[in-house]
Image (cartoon, rainbow, N blue to C red):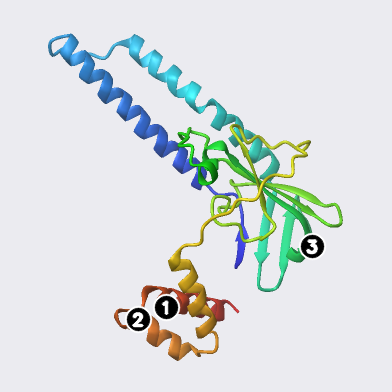
């Protein structure tokens, strides 16, 4: 894993998409009801437009507040992670600080309560702001960072730091006074992931030509084997 993380618009795009679906759905439902009630009169009501705008604003208010909060904390921050070299470099306001991943004292993902379904299977519904979250990262020397998913994109994946714990919150506002340690999220490893890792171990000694042979003849190999060969070849090229 080698990657540089900067501010991105992925979260904003998801939010806009959800709003578009919500607004279109509201319009269709309202027009349908109005059609049957008014015997074919499809005229838009000004009151309806005002109500629609009000509902959209209320539903988006938590997300808007989180966007402002996250942008404030991460607007001048970039993050570089190289898991193979055990390096994490944080650039904040022009000051670069380099640490070892092995020097991480605590790694806590603060994510929406919706994602607690992975543990208790309670069937919670997602909200406009459910995908928001941040990484509370503390090193052994006392350095502490709050890195939101306006910057990173792996908060809802399997944590790459083994000691990572989770805090589930309805409104994951960055709270520097938060002292709860968090809980361990035990995620079941899929068969595909297990097989892929097995093939990665088997293929590490193969050269580029042998890896390309597997990738170019995917019909002759298991999909996990092709995936493993692709990962190894990519790492060789990056290195």
Res. 42 visible in picture: no
Vertical side of 126 occupied by 9: above or below: below
Q: Residue at x 75, y 49 (%)?
A: 145
Furthest residue toward left: 39
User: Which residue carries the number 3 mark?
Assistant: 103
Query: Where's residue 26, x and y in %?
Result: 32, 24
Q: CA distance from mark 3 to mark 1?
A: 33 Å
- Front residue of 43/198: it is 198
Q: Residues within 10 Å of mark 3 (few under 14, many from 20)?
A: some
Q: Earlier in the sequence, mark 2 or mark 3?
A: 3
Q: Residues within 10 Å of mark 1 (few under 14, many from 20)?
A: many
Is the residue under label 2 in contact with that under label 1 (CB below 8 Å)?
A: yes
Q: Residue 28 vs residue 210: left or right?
A: left
User: Which residue carries the number 1 mark?
Assistant: 225
Residue 101 picture quarter: bottom right
User: Which residue carries the number 2 mark?
Assistant: 221
Q: CA distance from mark 2 to mark 3?
A: 40 Å
Res. 162 visible in picture: yes
Query: What is the quadrant of the C terminus in the image?
Result: bottom right
Q: Residue at x 55, y 53 (%)?
A: 153
Q: Residue 137 vs residue 65: left or right?
A: right
Q: Earlier in the sequence, mark 3 or mark 1?
A: 3
Provide the secondary structure element on which disc 1 rests: helix
């Amino acid at each position: 894993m080698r990657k540089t993380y900067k501010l991105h618009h992925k979260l904003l795009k998801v939010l806009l998409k959800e709003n578009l679906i919500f607004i279109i759905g509201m319009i269709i439902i309202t027009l349908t009801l109005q059609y049957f009630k008014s015997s074919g009169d499809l005229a838009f009501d000004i009151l309806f437009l005002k109500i629609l705008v009000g509902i959209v604003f209320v539903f988006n208010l938590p997300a808007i507040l989180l966007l402002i909060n996250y942008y404030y904390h991460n607007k001048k921050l970039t993050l570089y992670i190289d898991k193979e070299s055990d390096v994490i470099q944080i650039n904040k306001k022009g000051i670069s600080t380099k640490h070892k991943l092995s020097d991480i004292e605590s790694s806590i993902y603060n994510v929406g309560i919706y994602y607690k379904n992975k543990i208790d299977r309670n069937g919670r519904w997602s909200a406009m702001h459910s995908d928001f979250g941040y990484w509370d990262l503390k090193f052994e020397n006392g350095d502490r960072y709050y890195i939101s998913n306006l910057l990173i994109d792996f908060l809802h994946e399997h944590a790459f730091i083994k000691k990572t714990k989770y805090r589930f919150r309805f409104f994951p506002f960055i709270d520097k006074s938060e002292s709860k340690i968090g809980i361990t999220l035990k995620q079941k490893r899929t068969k595909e992931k297990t097989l892929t890792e097995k093939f990665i171990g088997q293929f590490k000694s193969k050269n580029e030509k042998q890896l390309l042979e597997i990738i170019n003849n995917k019909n002759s190999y298991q999909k996990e084997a092709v995936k493993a060969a692709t990962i190894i070849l990519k790492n060789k090229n990056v290195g």
